[in-house]
Image (tube, rainbow, N blue to C red):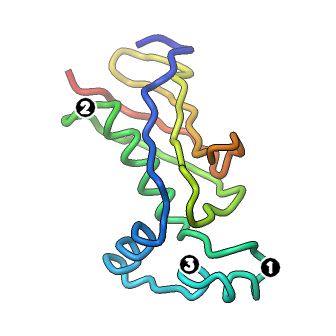
């Protein structure tokens, strides 16, 4: 890989079933994630996903692109917009630097309208 390369995307439809499964695994049944009225009461247009669900998508994207023996050295992300229920969420990334098997990657999650929900950077080591 070279600096400037776009990595294959990772996509998930974030519907109630995805939110519910994530909540069950993490014992994180938050009202604003499950109920539109609760979310509206907090100033959001509808129910929205847990930030850590997007975090897990960022990790899945990296795992998909670095191979089974690859290593995630560092991942930083800032959440900028909520992942509203029903959105098609895509994780995208661009290689920004290469040093042997180690890559620096700019990555982000975005909704189908192109709005970036989370912005991040990662350092990874690819498997052979």
- Residue, disc 2: 67
Would you say 54 lies left or right of 128 here?
Answer: right
Is 105 on the left or on the right of 67, as rendered? Answer: right
The residue positioned 46% from the left and 47% from the top of the image is: 58
Circle 2 residues within 10 Å: few <14, some 14–19, many ≥20: few
Asked if labels 1 and 2 touch by Cβ distance under 8 angstroms, the answer is no
- The answer to which image quadrant residue 110 occupies is top right
Q: Nearer the viewer, mark 2 or mark 3?
A: 3
User: Which circle's residue, 2 or 1, is located before the other in the chain?
Assistant: 1
Residue 76 place in picture, x, y as percent:
55, 49
Residue assigned mark 3: 33
Task: Please say if 15 is above or below 87.
Answer: below
Could you tell me which residue is drawn at 54 percent across and 25 percent down? 94
Quadrant showing the C terminus: top left
Residue pictured at 43% horizontal, 25% vertical: 103
Give the distance between the C-alpha atoms of the residues marked 2 and 3, in whole angstroms: 32 Å
- Mark 3: which secondary structure? helix
Q: Nearer the viewer, residue 109 or 14?
A: 14
The residue indicated by pointer 1 is 43
Among the 4 quarters of the image, the one containing residue 62: top left
Q: In what quadrant of the picture does the N terminus appear?
A: top left
């Amino acid at each position: 890989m070279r600096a400037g390369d776009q990595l294959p995307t990772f996509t998930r439809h974030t519907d109630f079933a995805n939110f519910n499964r994530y909540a069950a695994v993490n014992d994180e049944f938050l009202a604003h994630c499950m109920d539109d009225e609760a979310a509206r009461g907090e100033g959001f247009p509808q129910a929205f996903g847990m930030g850590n669900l997007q975090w897990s998508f960022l990790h899945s994207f990296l795992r998909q692109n670095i191979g089974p023996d690859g290593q995630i050295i560092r991942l930083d992300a800032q959440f900028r917009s909520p992942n509203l229920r029903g959105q098609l969420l895509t994780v995208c990334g661009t290689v920004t630097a290469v040093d042997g098997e180690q890559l620096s990657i700019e990555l982000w999650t975005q909704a189908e309208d192109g709005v970036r929900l989370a912005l991040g950077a990662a350092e990874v080591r690819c498997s052979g």
